[in-house]
Amino acid sequence: MEKNSIKVFFEPNSVAIIGASPKKENLGRIILDSMQKNYKGRLYVINPNYDEVQGVKSYKSILDIDDEIDIAVIAVDAKKVPDLMLDAGKKGVKGVVIVSGGFAEIDSELGYKLQEEIIEIANKFNMRILGPNCIGIYNSFKGVDTFFLPYERMRRPKSGAISIISQSGALLATLMDWAASKNIGIGKAINFGNKADIDEIDSLEYLGKDEETRVILMYIEGITPGKGYQFVETARKVTSVYRKPIILIKGGKTSRGASAAKSHTASLAGSYEIFKAISKQANIIIANDLEELFDIAKVMSFNLIPKGNRVGIITNSGGHGVIAADTLIENGLSVPEISEKIKEKLKEVFPPRVSLHNPIDFTGDAKSDYYKYVLDLLSENDEVDMFLIIALIQPQTMDLSISNVIFDFSQKHFDKPIAVVTIGAEMGEKLKLMLEEKGVPVFEFPDRASKALAKLYDCRKCSTKRFENCRRISISQESINRAREIIKNALYQNRNKLLENEALDLLNVIGVNTVKYCIVENYDMIKSCIKEINFPVAMKIISEGIIHKSDVGGVILNINNEEELAESYKNIIKNVKYRLPQAKISGVMIQEMAKQGNEIIVGSKFDENFGPIVLFGLGGIYTEVIGDVSMRMSPITDCDAREMIDEIKSVKILEGYRGLEPVDKNAVAEAIMRVGELMLAIPEISEMDINPLIASSLGVKAVDARVILKR
């Protein structure tokens, strides 16, 4: 049965609060107080112990109400929740907000049992659940407010175009209170707690379509297991089709944080590095910490997304200007030189001590009209796309009229985003408050303002990114069936790893080229084996129990003729038997030595949150030393694969650094895509890597491969 939209939670015509009492500290009572302030719909209270609560008639059961109920807010002990949900289901309630804790998050048999029970009831009646263990829903436009925090403990911000999705209720409350203190408008907010039903994907789908939302802030601790692909697809749609930036901060980055997340909301946090890679694939902007999330919210609430990355710095402090320029450039923005035409105009107005480059530095005797003149001049001549305005109030020539100059400019040139830096005792604080009252983003330090502008520009890149022309690669069903036979054979023999020749066979079957090779099980097979292989060759022992072949003399390179080959065969068998007498030798692989090229790695592993994750980077001996890799979740499109290649820091090596021949990036991308498709098609593979995969201008060829199977 298809689940109902969560729209009813944000726009209910009627709300029943179950568990509200006259006691001031009662959670249901606090929710009722909040709802009574601005909600225009029909409110009901369910509590068999009272006739009325706060002037609202109290019913013994939700079944006694002679009206349709859109949502019920349940604020009672966890053990009572299932029975109340049964009544709500019989009543035809469309959704329940369960603020109560005591479910899966407490990691007990009873908690898990209760959560399973409420899910079963909800499914039976096609009723949506928000929570449990949550503070619920906030819609400033409709007056919906299920947050059980009184106004004196959490200020409510004005209405605005930013909406928030948060797995943590307390963190959401902090964001809301902070937004109110900075005059930042919040339109809607949702906290889903344990995610028994409604999760980050449902929330994104709703807010993506919501006409009152322009920007989405997110805090999550883990993606619902098995929904990684859906999360990526939903986020891509929100950012590139609906053109709404998503700014996300992730909880559970470390093992300790992940453990805390599990006890907090019963979430599997997973690897943070993988999560960052998936967020990039999903077109999401990552905030590294709460401070950065707040900073981004400030610039986004006031500004439109910039048209380009050129920033004009106007300052009355040289040092602040230098730090701003450095930080902007380090974060991918441009600080362009001012054109000669504009410089000439500036020379007519300002004394020689004023620096007319970018940053434009008025030095210590700046005045408000200086800023006005330069801001207007640069904007009208389209010299820059954004402004970082540094207006320190310490100099005697500066006064608070700069506040009006900045705000008036922002209204006149609303297509030029701004960030302001100011500090300076009482006067500086006054200026800061004056600007914040108008919603202007103000920072104490230029580096923070610069990083916030960089994230604002990232939003432009995300909103202009398109995915409709990206394509997946196809592996024929016949090839997949042949690949399955290789895997099935190994599992039948009770092995959890493919032999090296089997791994190379697997790659050939799915269309990843390998160097030529053959297998000999005894000395007499050598001559017939090498008919199709050109010297020089390598020889490798094949044995399930030997992981590091070279450590036991199981690898011999650069064999140039048949004589050396025969001698090498005797030596390799002797070496292994001497150093590892218990080893079971399955044979010897004779392999063509790879032609010159760059050694890269393409690997994959199964992640419990996202499924198969594919990795790319420099291979051979550099893989673990440098650790310069990129990752994406499968399925991987050609767009994803090209991004993975271009993302590694050492990409210049692959592009023909210092006269070297550039590699065929299309061939590399295809290998990445084929590995991703294989992992999706055959879930029995736990992890694999091709290392090295030799990449050159002629394509790619696998030399070594490792495939680990799930038992």
Image: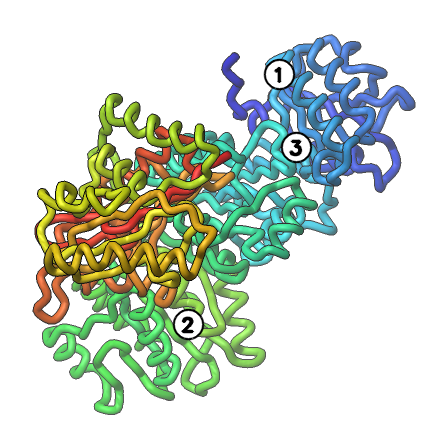
- The percent position of residue 676, horizontal first and vertical second, equals 32, 38
Please tell me the numbered disc located at residue 447.
2
Q: CA distance from mark 3 to mark 2?
A: 39 Å
Q: Sequence-wise, which precedes: disc 3 or disc 1? A: 1
- The percent position of residue 692, horizontal first and vertical second, equals 26, 55
Q: Is disc 3 surrounded by few (<14), some (14 to 19) or many (20+) residues within 10 Å?
A: many
Q: CA distance from mark 3 to mark 1?
A: 15 Å
Seen at 18% across and 74% down, the residue is 337
Q: Check if mark 2's residue and mark 1's residue have beta carbons within 8 Å.
A: no
Q: Assign a secondary structure to mark 2.
A: helix
Seen at 41% across and 76% down, the residue is 391
Q: Quadrant of residue 22?
A: top right
- The percent position of residue 509, horizontal first and vertical second, equals 23, 33
Q: Assign a secondary structure to mark 1.
A: helix
Q: Which residue lies most toward the front here?
A: 524
Residue 244 visible in the snapshot = no
Q: CA distance from mark 2 to mark 1?
A: 50 Å
Q: Which residue lies most toward the right here?
A: 49
Residue ID for mark 3: 131
Kind of residue at badge 1: Asn
Q: Nearer the viewer, mark 3 or mark 1?
A: 1
Q: Is disc 1 surrounded by few (<14), some (14 to 19) or many (20+) residues within 10 Å?
A: some
Residue ID for mark 1: 123
Q: Sequence-wise, which precedes: disc 3 or disc 2? A: 3
